[in-house]
Image (cartoon, rainbow, N blue to C red):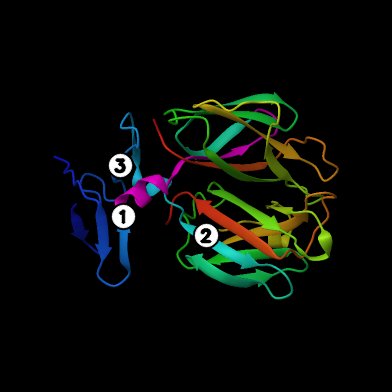
Amino acid sequence: MSTILVDNLTGKTSAGDITVTSEGGAATQSLQQGLAKAWGNIEPAATPTLHDSLNMASLTDHGTGEYSTNLTNGMSAIRSVYHSVTGSAQQTSGGDASSNIYYAGSGAINVPTSTNWPMRVVSGTGGQTEAGDYAGAAIFGDLA
Amino acid sequence: MAGTIIADTLTHSTAGSIATNYVVDGSAKAWVNFDGTGTIAVRDSLNNSSLTDNGTGDYTVTMSNAMADANYGMSGTAGRLANDGAFLTNPIGTYSNTTTTHRIKGLYQDGGALDMNMMSNDIKGDLA
């Protein structure tokens, strides 16, 4: 077994591109492109709270079940709406069904930027906005 | 000439260690952001070769490099420019994933399928 003691990994040929071999050995893939650039365990209810996170500095509350994630290190500004944001949510109180998370693209709070992405918790049964008890989100794409 | 390092563990001076299998296994093997309205168009992606429009809100995502099997994890979100409802993504129940393809769907708040302006999807699991 070998261990590398290192604080930073930088590609040699291209600084932002380190290649890793797939589990099955049949393919190679960019390490940087496969890594989530931010993720958060979020309690959306009342004042949104970050319980654990990577590269998420804070949340901004936009009303019941609506909030936006504020990143510490921004995504590529040129491609601010191009990164992939995935997630899930849950509503446990009141015997409600589980919810899903989504983002929209219009309105003052709904325009993604390089550091801010609007998200919303919605009911899994009726589609209405809910406060939610839990939400998770992950962002993939290019950091600035 | 590019160098190659073979190692089982990466150790940071202050932030701890991680086994390199977590780096490889824990990375997304594919992700895509696309516009699902009109002529569907990929905005940015990793390991995505094409998209197929199967009808309203119904898309097949095809990967360039195959997964080891079809039992990979999927997650996603969907949104429309009109802020007028709830939008979900979900696997298509009657469709079986393959090592290179899976289907996702955008749903309106009434549960009906709807074309989405913002579709995001990522895949975790083992590449072949």
Give the image location of residue A113, x and y in percent: 57, 58
> What is the three-letter code of the residue carrying label 1?
Ala
Q: Which residue is mark 1?
A: B19
User: Residue tagged by mark 2?
Assistant: A39
| Dot 3 amino acid type | Val
Q: Residue at x 45, y 31 (%)?
A: B67
Using the image as rendered, state which of residue A73 and residue A26 is in the foreground: A26
Contact? badges 2 and 1 (CB < 8 Å) = no
Q: Position of residue B116 (x, y in %)?
A: 71, 39
Label 2 to label 3, Cα distance in Å?
A: 22 Å
Looking at the picture, does residue A28 appear above or below residue A57? above
**Quadrant of the image occupied by residue A25:** top left
Which residue is tagged 3? A20
Tell me the number on the disc at residue B52. none
The residue range painted magenta reads B20-39
Q: Position of residue A30 (x, y in %)?
A: 35, 42
Tell if the residue under mark 2 belongs to the same chain as the one under mark 1: no
- Mark sitting earlier along the chain (2/3): 3
What is the residue that sits farthest to the left in this orientation? B1
Q: Are marks 1 and 3 in contact (CB under 8 Å)?
A: no
Crowd tier of the residue under label 3, counting other residues whose Cα lies within 10 Å: few below 14, some 14–19, many 20 or above:
some
Task: State how many labels appear.
Answer: 3
